[in-house]
Image: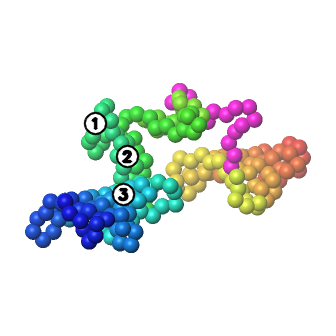
Amino acid sequence: LHNYYDASSIEMITGVSGGYYCGITMSGRSASSYGDTVRLFTHGVMHVTVDGTGNMGLLEGSVTTIPTNYDKTLLVYTAGTGSSLRLCDGNTGTGLGDGGEIIQYSSDMYVFNREAGQMYLGTSNTERITIKSTGEVGIGLTNPDSYYGKQLVVAAADESGITIMGTGSNQKQYLCWASNSTGANAYAGYIAYDHNTNSMSLATNGGASAITIDNAQKVGIGYTSPGSQLS
């Protein structure tokens, strides 16, 4: 245990010839390159940093500080590719296929429950979104797998629902059914609303128009421009 450079910086180390084996540095010098920080080194490499405002980093390489826009930040950084935060308890085990994990891999981010259990997202101390272990998603309910069409189930109160909002005033949006992503199979059947004409259409058999309702509520069966209330 000794002072490092001046009385406001302290090191506790065990060493080997040519460098540190492990150590802790504590610096309170505002003028130093390390600033007001505590750092943990192993094999001469810094791995943990706690700065003067309580931000914490698991760092390596040339990154030695913790940028933040918030009061407190935990930064996990690798100079290679892929960093993760793993959460396990006494019921999950600690293997690579256990517990939960948040992963940043290059430009992609993953959130996994690696157990055969559910995932829940909530607000105001209430579960809002449930993902079952078999992949069904419920919004506003926890049992989407109880329904016939169960991949996505939304619980809606009176005067509630689902909205598809266009990003411009002269656009057309679709709700599609597909058998695969090739050609017309990607939109074998659909319901569409065209904001250019304020009309709605229903199509079958690869996008062939079956029913059209125009902006005057005229209905065409097999016609895209109905001339009467029912054509």
Q: What residue type is disc 2 on?
A: Glu
Q: Quadrant of residue 150?
A: top right
Q: Earlier in the sequence, mark 3 or mark 1?
A: 3
Task: Tell me the CA gap for discs 3 and 1.
Answer: 29 Å
Q: Residue furthest top?
A: 146
Residue annotated with mark 3: 50
**Viewer-nearest residue: 230 or 59:** 59
Residue at x 39% of width, y 52% of height: 103
From the viewer's perspective, tell me whether residue 1 is left or right of residue 85: left
Q: Earlier in the sequence, mark 2 or mark 3?
A: 3
The reply to whether residue 178 is visible in this rendering is yes
Residue at x 17% of width, y 65% of height: 20
Which residues lie in the magenta part? 145-164
Q: For residue 149: magenta?
A: yes
Residue 222: x percent and y percent? 76, 48
Q: Earlier in the sequence, mark 1 or mark 2?
A: 1
Residue annotated with mark 1: 93
Dot 3 falls on a residue whose secondary structure is: strand
Image mark for residue 101:
2
